[in-house]
Image: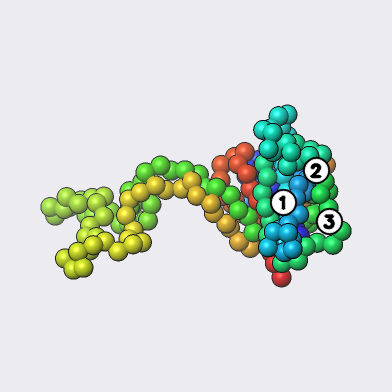
Amino acid sequence: MKALLTKKIGMTSVISEDGSVAAVTLLSANPNVVTQIKSDETDGYQAVQIGAGEVKKVAKPQMHHLKSANKLVATVREIRVNELPEGIKIGDQLAADLFSAGDIINVTATSKGKGFAGTIKRHNFHLGRKTHGGSNYRKPGSIGSMYPQKIFKGKKMAGQMGDEQVTTKNLKVALVDMENSVIGVFGAVPGPRKGLVIIRGKRS
């Protein structure tokens, strides 16, 4: 199982040996701890629950749940697996060296919230013309005909934009810095700085 809970630091650029410049997102990959192991026999599915983040105090239910891991963590997430890794047990530490440069990964995070947005910003609709008597600049236009006298689900309209779970697939690990517990990923990663980012190794 190759998965880590990380925190987004920001973006920078790296220069390769041939002189080309590439954008890289830096992720803080402090050690994670295995807090629970779920199996088909006990839970009906297979998953490994991991936690990360320093915290001094948690509620009693969480404290009881994390007692076996012997560590209090701020964030807990479950990673589904096809097969449970051999030798893994509650309390094990997972560090940045779980990944190496060149690995192909998928990253999941909550995108930046943009608030209530119109169709031009949200769905890239065209502006209306501003000459020859045009007055419909930013309106969506027709949203349906007289029949069947309803609006079909999925119609592109104005509404809440962003603040939703986004998974970006097939990104490449650029660097792994064990000294500073940092993982660099080529390209952009969804979410704001200091946001939670889950990175997973691509399943074969």
Q: In which quarter of the image is the N terminus?
A: bottom right
Q: How many marks?
A: 3
Q: Which residue is drawn at 71% across and 70% down?
A: 204
Q: Which is more toward the observer, 70 or 172?
A: 70
Q: Which residue is drawn at 67% across and 33% down?
A: 59
- Secondary structure under tag 1 reads strand
Residue 175 left/right relative to 138: right
| Amino acid type, mark 3 | Ile
Residue marked by disc 1: 49
- Secondary structure under tag 3 reads loop
Residue 144: percent from left, percent from top: 22, 63
Residue 3: percent from left, percent from top: 72, 55
Crowding at label 3, few (<14), some or many (≥20) Cα neighbours within 10 Å? few
Residue marked by disc 3: 88
Q: How far apart, in angstroms, are the residues tagged by discs 2 and 1?
A: 11 Å
Q: Is residue 27 visible?
A: no
Q: Earlier in the sequence, mark 1 or mark 3?
A: 1
Residue 35: percent from left, percent from top: 76, 47
Q: Which is more toward the observer, 133 or 72?
A: 72
Circles 1, 3 touching at the beta carbon (< 8 Å): no
Q: How far apart, in angstroms, are the residues tagged by discs 1 and 3?
A: 11 Å
Residue 86 picture quarter: bottom right
Residue 87 left/right relative to 197: right
Residue 66 picture quarter: top right
Residue marked by disc 2: 69
Q: How far apart, in angstroms, are the residues tagged by discs 3 and 2?
A: 12 Å
Q: Which of marks 2 and 1 is nearer the N terminus?
A: 1
Circles 3, 2 touching at the beta carbon (< 8 Å): no
| Amino acid type, mark 2 | Ala
Task: Give the residue at the far front of this rendering.
Answer: 42
| Amino acid type, mark 1 | Gln
